Image (cartoon, helix red, strand yellow):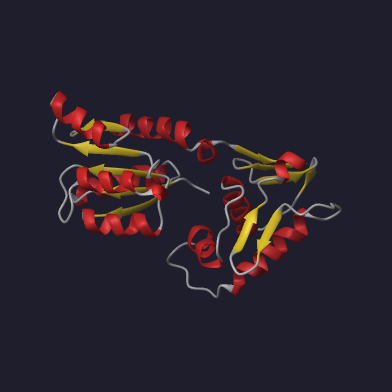
Amino acid sequence: MAARILIVEDEEPLTLLLRYNLEAEGYAVDAAGRGDDADLRLKESPPDLAIVDWMLPGLSGIELIRRLRARTETQALPVIMLTARGEEGERVRGLATGADDYIVKPFSVPELLARIRALLRRTKPERVASVLTAGDIELNREKKRVARSGRDVPLGPTEFRLLEFLMENPGRVFSREQLLDRVWGRDVYIDERTVDVHVGRLRKALNRGQRSDPIRTVRGAGYALNDRYGAEA
């Protein structure tokens, strides 16, 4: 799965520029033009990284970051702050509030992309690694191939994305609704039972000739990649 980045910026031309360049790099991008709107989105579905402007309508970037750091689910969310304020005191204030990095407008887009990659490598290595492993399962993002115990596992595009997402979050249980949002996307409207069908297909492909099932079903809650599977395999 591509790393998800939320742009919180009220200057539409800048938002469009950032979205174009981030999507060209392979990231999944969402945007909010107001601080209060971004706060609601971040509560519902935290991204992998946020780019936050200092001056925003509804809720300032500084206050938004304070709220992020006060919530357990977004306490460690990587945040890059954008601002026209270049004075040392302002940079210190932004970083002290909880921003992980700080870049002053106007800025170089390649420099921002480099800082994003560096932050993700440090905080979300599973999002940028080309190969994911769990026990005897290996998923190669670049080649779009999956193998188990050295045997190729043919998967359809949806099953590949589903396995990729579960391997990025070992042990965490996701409801069908959450999987629909993260794997299929917010704008796709399909029945939640579709998730069960694709999990069944993924299991069948992975477990052919194998005794252990790496996918755990939690009754009434959803599915997870067994976090003890890698240790036991």
Pick the residue in front: 61 or 108. 61
Q: Is residue 126 rendered to the left or right of residue 58?
A: right
Q: Is residue 117 rendered to the left or right of residue 184?
A: left
Give the residue displayed 13% in from the left and 33% down from the top. Answer: 85
Q: Is residue 13 above or below residue 186?
A: above
Answer whether residue 223 is visible to the viewer in this image: yes
Give the residue displayed 41% in from the left and 57% down from the top. Answer: 45
Q: Is residue 144 rendered to the left or right of residue 117?
A: right
Q: Is residue 193 above or below residue 151?
A: below
| Image quarter (top left, top right, bottom left or bottom right) of the C terminus | top right
Residue 1 position within the rendered picture, expressed as x and y whole percent measured from the top left? 53, 49
**How many marks do you count on the picture?**
0
Picture quarter containing residue 37?
Answer: bottom left
Residue 130 position within the rendered picture, expressed as x and y whole percent measured from the top left? 58, 37
Answer whether residue 33 is visible to the viewer in this image: no
Pick the residue in front: 14 or 32. 32
Residue 169 position within the rendered picture, expressed as x and y whole percent measured from the top left? 57, 48
Residue 109 position within the rendered picture, expressed as x and y whole percent measured from the top left? 29, 34
Picture quarter containing residue 219?
Answer: bottom right
Pick the residue in front: 40 or 204. 40
Residue at the far top in the pictured view:
88
Q: Is residue 106 above or below residue 169?
A: above
Give the residue displayed 40% in from the left and 48% down from the top. Answer: 72
